[in-house]
Image (cartoon, rainbow, N blue to C red):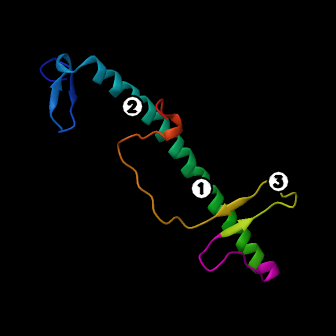
Amino acid sequence: MVDGKEHRTDTKGSLVPITLVKPRDLLQDETTRKIMGYAIALSEQASRFKAHVAEDISLFEEILALEYEAKIGGPKGNKTIMPMTVFSGSQSAPQINTSSGPSCRLPRAWSTNA
């Protein structure tokens, strides 16, 4: 709020009175903020999962080394552990490249034009 009027920040960082923002742009902003809210929550959950998996695999490796003088993993650091039933498993691979930004891109399969 500036001088009692609601504003939005445009792509250049300027404050624009809400009365000058097109309804289409407000809808797009609202939708994007909603989607990004879901994405942030999911990202936080995935980060917690990743930390739990790393801790569990690290503990498993310690026990394997101490009790069985064995180790898992290849020269690049990739590790695969499988349950005896082989219905599911867990893989750990060093992450090479990640990036994130403020934009939200949908996979082509989600696009209405695909």
Question: Which of 67/95 is in front?
Answer: 95
Report how far apart the C-alphas of labels 2 and 3 lie in the structure: 38 Å
| Residue 63 image position (x, y, % from top left) | 76, 73
Q: Quadrant of the N terminus?
A: top left
- Label 2 element class: helix
Quarter of the view holding residue 54: bottom right
Residue 75 counted in the magenta span: yes
Give the quarter of the image for residue 33.
top left
Which element type, helix, strand or loop, lies under badge 3? loop
Q: Which disc, if any, is residue 17?
A: none
Dot 1 corresponds to which residue?
A: 50
Mark 3 — residue?
87
Main secondary structure found in the magenta portion: loop
Outermost residue to the left: 3
Mark number, residue 32: 2
**Nearer to us in this view, 49 or 90:** 90
Residue depicted at x 71% and y 74% = 62
Cα separation, mark 1 vs mark 2, equals: 26 Å
Count of numbered marks: 3
Amino acid type, residue under disc 3 in the picture: Phe
Q: Residues within 10 Å of mark 1 (few under 14, many from 20)?
A: few
Q: Amino acid at mark 2?
A: Thr
Outermost residue, right side: 85
Q: Which residue extends farthest front?
A: 114
In the displayed structure, 87 sits above or below 110; it is below
Q: Is residue 38 left or right of residue 23?
A: right
Q: Locate residue 16 relative to residue 25 in the image: left or right.
A: left
Query: Closer to the N terminus: mark 2 or mark 3?
Result: 2
Up/down of 86 relative to 39, above or below: below
What span is in magenta? 66-78
Disc 1 from disc 3: Cα separation: 21 Å
Q: Quadrant of residue 50?
A: bottom right
